[in-house]
Image (cartoon, rainbow, N blue to C red):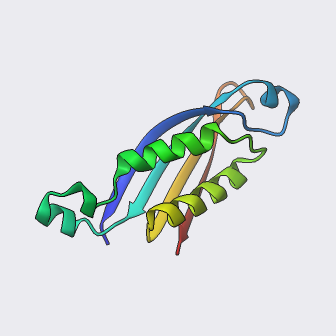
Amino acid sequence: MDKIFLNDLKIDTIIGIYDWERQTQQTLSFDLEMDWDIKPAAESDDINKTLDYGAVAQRIVAFVKASEYLLIETLAEDLCAMLLEEFAIPRIKLTLSKPVALHGQNTARIVIERSH
């Protein structure tokens, strides 16, 4: 299976369990690896025969900006479920990163893989 990557998509949203996190937006970073058969598009040079990663990115931005999850785990699950459903992606691997203030500047990161 071919892969389409969408990397370093940064989106500001409300996320987190602490009171201070609920008061200000934080920048999350999204990296996606999506299975897709690109051969039909390559043979025809027709965007309608491939996964429109621009449309995927716009949908992710709209979804995340409208959300106010407590946990990045829940956001990741719901986002993957929506993408699998709306774009008929066979398999998706999502890496979601969030800045954290543990010791200096750190990043919390989760990786999930989901499929139909």
**Residue found 54% across the figure and 51% down from its top:** 95
User: Could you say where residue 10 lies in the image, as x and y percent from the top left?
Assistant: 51, 34
Q: Residue furthest right?
A: 19
With 82 as the anchor, is 19 left or right in this view? Answer: right
The quadrant in which residue 107 appears is top right
Q: Nearer the viewer, residue 32 or 69?
A: 69
Q: Nearer the viewer, residue 96 or 82?
A: 82
User: Could you say where residue 86 lies in the image, as x and y percent from the top left?
Assistant: 50, 61
**Residue found 83% across the figure and 26% down from its top:** 20
Above or below — where is 25 with respect to 61? above
**Residue found 42% across the figure and 57% down from its top:** 33
**Residue found 80% across the figure and 25% down from its top:** 23
The quadrant in which residue 42 appears is bottom left
Above or below — where is 76 with respect to 98? below
Above or below — where is 20 with respect to 97? above
Q: Nearer the viewer, residue 102 or 6?
A: 6
With 61 as the anchor, is 49 left or right in this view? Answer: left
Q: Quadrant of the N terminus?
A: bottom left
With 36 as the anchor, is 67 left or right in this view? Answer: right
Above or below — where is 19 with respect to 61? above
User: Could you say where residue 31 lies in the image, as x and y percent from the top left?
Assistant: 47, 47
